[in-house]
């Protein structure tokens, strides 16, 4: 959405959530962000903490990364890219009974695919990503 500017990205979450809470008009992107934030009440108190570092070595989970993965998955599902992800998601929804729970199962695969892509300085391996997702159906 905003490249590598962490604070600008986090500000977008804060703005969207604030507008949602005040029942103000939201852009389509803000509505998507607000929907994801709403589904994560455990993060509501962190939305305004734009400068906080979330370090894995400290046992911190980054709420903005987590919610960003939800947004990324939803974009993939809506565009069916990689091909077949929409159907796979639907199958996981049927297994779990909940779209949000299905996304939580899928997030680890997306995060791994992104990490591998960055660490190897290669484009994402869609085939490897889909293989990881397909294992969730077993």
Image (cartoon, grey):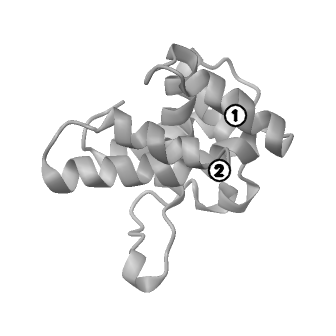
Residue 31 seen anywhere in this rendered image of the structure: no
> Please, what secondary structure does the residue beneath circle 1 have?
helix
Residue placed most toward the observer, 69 or 38: 69
How packed mark 1 is, by other alpha carbons closer than 10 Å (few <14, some 14-19, many 20 or more), is some
- Dot 1 or dot 2: first in sequence order is 1
Residues at circles 1 and 2 in contact by the CB criterion of under 8 Å: no
The residue at 65%/50% (across/down) is: 104
Q: Is residue 48 above or below residue 5?
A: below
The residue at 60%/22% (across/down) is: 86
| Image position of 50 (left or right of 95) | left
Q: Looking at this rendering, what residue extends furthest in the left direction?
A: 121
Of the numbered discs in the image, which one, if any, rests on residue 135? none
| Distance in Å between CA atoms under marks 1 and 2 | 15 Å
Q: Position of residue 102 (x, y in %)?
A: 70, 43
Residue under label 2 = 104
Q: Position of residue 114 (x, y in %)?
A: 33, 47
Residue under label 1 = 35
Residue placed most toward the observer, 1 or 132: 132
How packed mark 2 is, by other alpha carbons closer than 10 Å (few <14, some 14-19, many 20 or more), is some
Residue 10 seen anywhere in this rendered image of the structure: yes
Q: Position of residue 16 (x, y in %)?
A: 59, 33
Q: Quadrant of residue 8?
A: top left
The residue at 75%/55% (across/down) is: 41
> Please, what secondary structure does the residue beneath circle 2 have?
helix
Q: Quadrant of residue 133?
A: top right
Q: Position of residue 39 (x, y in %)?
A: 74, 45
Q: Is residue 108 above or below residue 37?
A: below
Q: Looking at this rendering, what residue extends furthest in the right direction?
A: 97
The residue at 24%/43% (across/down) is: 4
């Amino acid at each position: 959405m905003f490249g590598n500017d962490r604070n600008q990205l986090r500000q977008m979450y804060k703005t969207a959530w604030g507008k949602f809470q005040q029942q103000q008009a939201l852009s389509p992107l803000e509505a998507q962000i607000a929907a994801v934030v709403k589904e994560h009440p455990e993060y509501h108190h962190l939305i305004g903490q734009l400068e906080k570092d979330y370090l894995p070595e400290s046992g911190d989970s980054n709420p903005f990364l987590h919610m960003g993965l939800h947004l990324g998955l939803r974009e993939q599902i809506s565009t069916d890219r990689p091909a077949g992800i929409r159907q796979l998601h639907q199958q996981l929804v049927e297994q779990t009974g909940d779209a949000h729970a299905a996304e939580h199962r899928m997030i680890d695969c997306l995060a791994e695919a992104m990490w591998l892509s960055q660490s190897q300085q290669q484009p994402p391996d869609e085939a490897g990503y889909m293989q990881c997702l397909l294992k969730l159906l077993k």
